[in-house]
Image: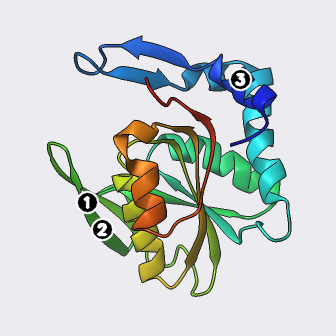
Amino acid sequence: MYSSSVHDYLRDHIRTVPNWPAPGVQFRDITPLLQDPKVFRVLIDAFVHRYMDRDLRPDVVAGLDARGFIIGSVIAYELGVGFVPIRKKGKLPFTTVEETYELEYGSATVELHTDAVQPGDKVLLIDDLIATGGTMMAGKKLLEKLGATVMEGAAIVDLPELGGSHLLQTVGKLPLFTLVDFAGH
């Protein structure tokens, strides 16, 4: 987690949409963070300042489809490193590697271009939110198939009660950095 003032500021700009996309779900909508230029700057700076540290600086940022593209590409630009997208199956035009993971209602597959990273690259893997952890775990496995090291997973929001952050840290051995959590909600 980040300092409480940044945490609170960002949390205050995340919209909760009740009963969407299904009854009983409290959807955490990050689009207000992106709409206000000041809030968007605070959000991006919170990540950039962390990863400017020499020990945490990645060689490349990988963003998960689709909101991970928005923040990941800006963070990569600010850090002066490359950005690679991890996409849903069938969306990338070149040769890919793929990873299938289980969802509550079935399965999904994500892909990465085979030349996206090089063996030994230190990668920051980023998404907007950690819920069950399935997408981030699949992204980590894809990057590792190509020989990269995922140094950390990062997200704006953690929903710890859904178990994703615990799964990623214990089973996936992935250090995590998040800015806001909605524990107990």
Point out the tag, 1 or 3, that comes first from the N-terminus.
3
Mark 2 highlights which residue?
A: 99
Mark 3 highlights which residue?
A: 8
Q: Nearer the viewer, residue 93 or 183?
A: 183
Spatial CA distance of label 1 from label 2 is 7 Å
Q: Which secondary structure lies at badge 1?
A: strand
Spatial CA distance of label 2 from label 3 is 35 Å
Residue 16 x/y as whole percent: 47, 15
Q: Nearer the viewer, mark 1 or mark 2?
A: 1
* Label pair 1/2, CB-CB below 8 angstroms: yes
Residue 101 shows which numbered tag?
A: 1
Spatial CA distance of label 1 from label 3 is 33 Å
Classify mark 3: residues with Cα within 10 Å, few (<14), some (14-19) or many (20+): few
Q: Is residue 113 left or right of residue 71?
A: left
Residue 22 x/y as whole percent: 23, 20
Residue 26 x/y as whole percent: 37, 20
Looking at this view, name the residue that lies furthest to the top. Answer: 18
Q: Is residue 93 visible?
A: no
Give amino acid for label 2: Glu
Instruction: Give the residue drawn at x 73%, y 34%.
Output: 43
Looking at this view, name the residue that lies furthest to the left. Answer: 106
Classify mark 2: residues with Cα within 10 Å, few (<14), some (14-19) or many (20+): some
* Label pair 1/3, CB-CB below 8 angstroms: no
Residue 22 shows which numbered tag?
A: none
Give amino acid for label 1: Tyr
* Label pair 2/3, CB-CB below 8 angstroms: no
